[in-house]
Amino acid sequence: MSQKERNEEILNIQELGSAEIQKKMAQGCDTVLIPIGSCERHGNPYTPLGTDGLVSFTVAEWAARKADVLYTPLMPFGYAPHHMGKVGEGAGTITLSAETYRRVLMDIGRSLIFHGFNKLIFVSFHSFNVTNAEEVLFSLRFHTGAFVAFYGGRETPNVQQILGSTPDRLASDFEASMILALMGDKGLHEEHMNRSYRIHAPEWMGPAFTKRAGTGMAVNFKGSENIFLGMDDFEFVEPVSRVDQGVSKASAEKGRMILDRAAQDLAEFVEEVKKMKIEVRNRDFPDRARPLF
């Protein structure tokens, strides 16, 4: 297959018939990417709620093209209870409970394994989707033998180099750049670009604790991020003005570079996964419908 033909080949299972998927699997494609999103408010209130989903889907799509594997449609909702905020404040935010979220992932995984996939890679740029899926990784692996992994990434050293932003602006410019790349001015207007936010330990904890962006619910104590709390995001995220943090260095060009770097990293991981010899011992999915009472 030429590079042009490969670029034009449909790899999203949503757009393929079952016979075409069977043909692709018969050619040796036993790996599938599964993008998982989130619908949540962000530190900048003008950042689209679906940012993490748009990014996760794009990275999965680009990586699938590079590595020649199939991928699923985006699951748009995830685990984000801390982003609900106060009543009405996080308007539009939707969260699944941890149990519902895990059950959704389990059912997606069992369905794909049932039909012959041996290697499943969930993809999400919403960190709480990753940390709350560990039980699913164990369950699918232990009950079926399939290879099941979760690929997640946020502010990597590459991102810092691409953006050239100060640490306080990094998270804001990271999100803004990718939205500009994916949606242009429809996603984030210029007058909203310089709105940013500061990450800090909750004030009620006192001066002994600090917090930095990209660490989930971890709080730093005595130089180590070894304290984990259940918090609402308004307790550790504080909006700030452009005067406090300077002008944004976000751009669509930087966003495309970040997305391509993430897709390349994922594709290289997928290429290694494709080499693995995985034996699935149980594909049955008898509990795919509610049992009779």
Image: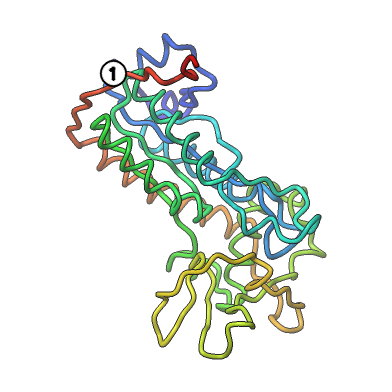
Q: Which residue is mark 1?
A: 27
Residue at image x 49%, y 44%? 59
Tell which of 2 and 51 is nearer to you. 51
- Residue 109's image quarter? top left
Q: Is residue 143 visible?
A: yes
From what the image shows, is residue 133 above or below residue 293? Answer: below
Quarter of the image where the N terminus is located:
top left
Tell me which corner region of the image, top left, top right, bottom left or bottom right, holds residue 142: top left
Q: Residue at x 38, y 48 (%)?
A: 134
Q: Position of residue 102 (x, y in %)?
A: 47, 40
Residue 161 appears in the picture as rendered: no
Total of numbered circles in the picture? 1
For the point 49% across and 56% down, which residue is it?
127
Q: Measured from the top left, where is residue 198 in percent x and y?
A: 65, 76
* Residue at the top extreme, as displayed: 19
Q: Is residue 123 above or below residue 127?
A: above
Lateral position of residue 172 relative to residue 106, left or right: right
Crowding near pointer 1: few (<14 within 10 Å), some, many (20+)?
A: few
The single residue placed furthest to the front in the displayed view is 293
- Image position, residue 192 (x, y; %): 79, 64
Q: Please tell me whether residue 62 is drawn above or below residue 237 in the rendered image.
A: above
> Which amino acid does the dot numbered 1 rest on?
Gln
Q: Position of residue 79 (x, y in %)?
A: 56, 48
Secondary structure at badge 1 equals loop
Judging from the image, the colouring scheme is: rainbow
In the image, is residue 147 above or below residue 97?
Answer: above
> Is 275 left, or right, of 270 in this rendering?
left
Residue at 76% across / 83% down in the picture?
Answer: 243
Query: Residue extending furthest bottom?
Result: 207
